[in-house]
Image (cartoon, rainbow, N blue to C red):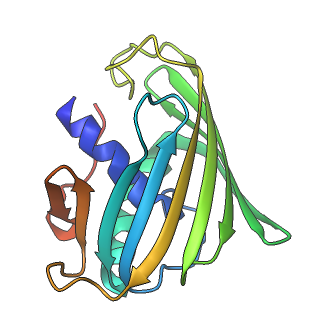
Amino acid sequence: MRRLMILLPLMAVAAPVAAAGFNLPPRKPGQWEMKIQVDTAAMPPQIIRMCLDAETDKMLNDRFGGLAANMCTKQEQRTEGDSIILDSECALGQMQSSTHTVVTGDFNSAYTMKTTVHMSGQRDSPGAIDKVSPQGPDSQETTIEAKRVGECEASMKPGDIDLGSGRAMNVRDLPEPHIQ
């Protein structure tokens, strides 16, 4: 369960290209702050801070892109006006999910990702991502508001991710993600 609680915010950090096949621009190097709000969470938004350079941004996306590629049978990207639309269908064990994401803004200064996920199937089966809450909702909306706040803080080096509450790590030290 502890691994899952760390993995989910990291997937949000990698969200700009969290699935192979999606071709979104890299984020501008520097200090980024992401506010993550989940509609079903009875808590305030989570704030994640990270210091990125071109190498660590790509590393984050590559690391989680492989995970999504193994789980997803559909990954489509299209542009509608100023928005990028991402649709995917994925499976984890006997649980299926359908995800629709709308990305607005740019990857140089600020962007917003609004994601709707619909889940079905047996969610308490071996390998189900939400074994920690098998009776949870069948749909969820998540909003990520990301903004570049300047150059990296002196206390952070490229790849450092501050998940809040004293939880910090560097993308270079992360193991390959595996959901069991």
Quadrant of the drawing holding the N terminus: top left
Question: Measured from the top left, where is residue 46 in percent x and y?
Answer: 38, 48
**Residue 1 versus residue 110: which sits nearer the camera?**
110
Residue 6: name its quadrant: top left
Q: In this orientation, does residue 14 appear?
A: no
Residue 2 in the figure: left or right of residue 57:
left
Question: Measured from the top left, where is residue 65 in percent x and y?
Answer: 44, 58
Is residue 71 placed above or below 108 in the rendered structure?
Answer: above
Residue 27 in the figure: left or right of residue 24:
left
Residue 94 in the figure: left or right of residue 9:
right
Tell me which residue sits at (36%, 55%) in the image: 47
Quadrant of the drawing holding the C terminus: top left
Tell me which residue sits at (57%, 78%) in the image: 25
Tell me which residue sits at (33%, 18%) in the image: 126
**Residue 164 versus residue 69: which sits nearer the camera?**
164
Residue 137: name its quadrant: top right
Question: Looking at this rendering, what residue extends furthest in the right direction?
Answer: 81
Question: Measured from the top left, where is residue 99 in percent x and y?
Answer: 63, 41
Tell me which residue sits at (45%, 10%) in the image: 135
Q: In this orientation, does residue 174 appear?
A: yes
Is residue 147 placed above or below 94 in the rendered structure?
Answer: below
Residue 90: name its quadrant: top right
Question: Measured from the top left, where is residue 122 in percent x and y?
Answer: 49, 12
Question: Looking at this rendering, what residue extends furthest in the front direction?
Answer: 44
